[in-house]
Amino acid sequence: MENIIRSKYIERIRPYYESDLIKVITGVRRCGKSVILSQIIGEIQSKVDSAHIIKIDLESVEGRKINTCEKLESKISNLILDNNKYYVFIDEIQNINNFEVALASIRVSFNCSIFVTGSNSKLLSGKLQDKLTGRAKEFEVLPFTFSEYIEFKQINHLPFDYDEDFKDYLKLGGMPQRFNESNEMEVRRYLRGIFDSIIEKDVFSAHKKINKNEFKRIANYVLSESGKPFSSMSAAKALEKGIDNEKARSKSITINNYLEYLIESYLITECEPHYQKGKERLNGTKKYYPVDIGMKNSLGLNASIDETFSLEWVIYNELVSRGYEVFYEKLRDGEIDFTVVNGNKKCFVQVSYYMENESTLNREYGAFDKIRDNSPKYVFSLDKKDSSRNGITHINIIDFLTNKVDLMFS
């Protein structure tokens, strides 16, 4: 199958092609980082001598032999033969021990522009940032949005129908290589395989002393509760019935550690609360969303698919992919699904499946009653009929995802 051009990511990275900042492309395994790297190489190859392009795939047979910073430095220094500019591409940099030392050395020793990919969300806040403060720029990649899903089908001359394909997207998500599978059963098997591989490569290999069975149990619980305000204390008591408060507090520490491991490996993302009072981002219960709804659904954690949660996931990931900051709005006795921040402006978003009666309409639009902020307010649903009222705008979800309508901020 032919790959689509991941335009939104390429356009963000392109202004830095000649920069001496290290370009760090991060995201969950198999979300398409390597394809984006190849597409960048294709653009640069049209302007420079291919001999000045160096690509090292650290997960290839040859690349796995390069497992220390010394070996990486030696490999690259042997390939740089003159003082002209080189473009260095390194796939899955976290596979190198002390990779940050190698990158710092290569950056200062040669006339080069460096691009790396990584499957760990802490690359820039951890080792890389310690050695390269202010010298690296991160670009986070997500699985296909729905518009990319449709574009992929179009470019590969596959039949598509917005409504039916959206149901498929809600069920099986947007991991790019799932389209190579022949049926739903094979897609689910493929997605379970990705999940297991990420756990092994990005969690267990990094945390050797971890209790594997306990981690898997807690990971499954977190994913089954995704989209709901999450408390590690409540989770501890739910996982071990009858546990006392002291043991629950101890268990909650383990759960918080495991949450960090899930975030590091990009299996989940964290949505923090935003409070109307003082507009502060306070420490409170957070929500967690899977990086891909299909991966979560393939694990069989729920007897049936929660359509409203799945829609929340779609909107959350779409907003994040567009570069917005996204929070959930915590009210004194309720909440709004999302506060969306664009620079110093924002808007509020409430997500519903279908609003089939006046009671549902009143509930979804009434959620904004206690917000005195004049920023734009939106209700998203699959209804095709515009039900906008009281200054609150209704948006059809598929129209939004396919760029027929957009948000306004103030």
Image (cartoon, rainbow, N blue to C red):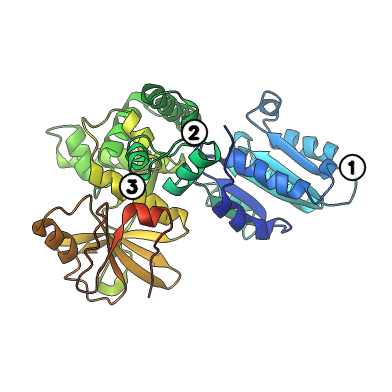
Q: Quadrant of the N terminus?
A: top right
Tell which circle, 2 or 3, labels the residue nearer the N-terminal end: 2
Q: Residues within 10 Å of mark 3 (few under 14, many from 20)?
A: many
Residue 232 appears anywhere in the view = no
Q: Calculate the distance from the C-alpha at mark 3 to the C-alpha at mark 1.
A: 49 Å
Which amino acid type corresponds to the residue marked 3 in the rendered image? Answer: Trp
Mark 1 sits on what residue? 81
Which amino acid type corresponds to the residue marked 2 in the rendered image? Answer: Asp
Numbered mark located on residue 119 in the image: none
Frontmost residue, 351 versus 232: 351
Tell which circle, 3 or 1, labels the residue nearer the N-terminal end: 1
Callout in the foreground (1, 2): 1
60 left or right of 359 in image: right
Q: Position of residue 368 (x, y in %)?
A: 20, 67
Frontmost residue, 44 versus 389: 389
Mark 2 sits on what residue? 202
Residue 47 appears anywhere in the view = yes
Q: Are marks 3 and 1 in contact (CB under 8 Å)?
A: no
Q: Residues within 10 Å of mark 1 (few under 14, many from 20)?
A: few
Q: Position of residue 106 (x, y in %)?
A: 76, 47
Q: Quadrant of the C terminus?
A: bottom left
Q: Which element type, helix, strand or loop, lies under badge 2? A: helix
Mark 3 sits on what residue? 313
Q: Which element type, helix, strand or loop, lies under badge 1? A: loop
Q: Calculate the distance from the C-alpha at mark 2 to the C-alpha at mark 3.
A: 23 Å
107 left or right of 131 in image: right
Tell which circle, 1 or 2, labels the residue nearer the N-terminal end: 1
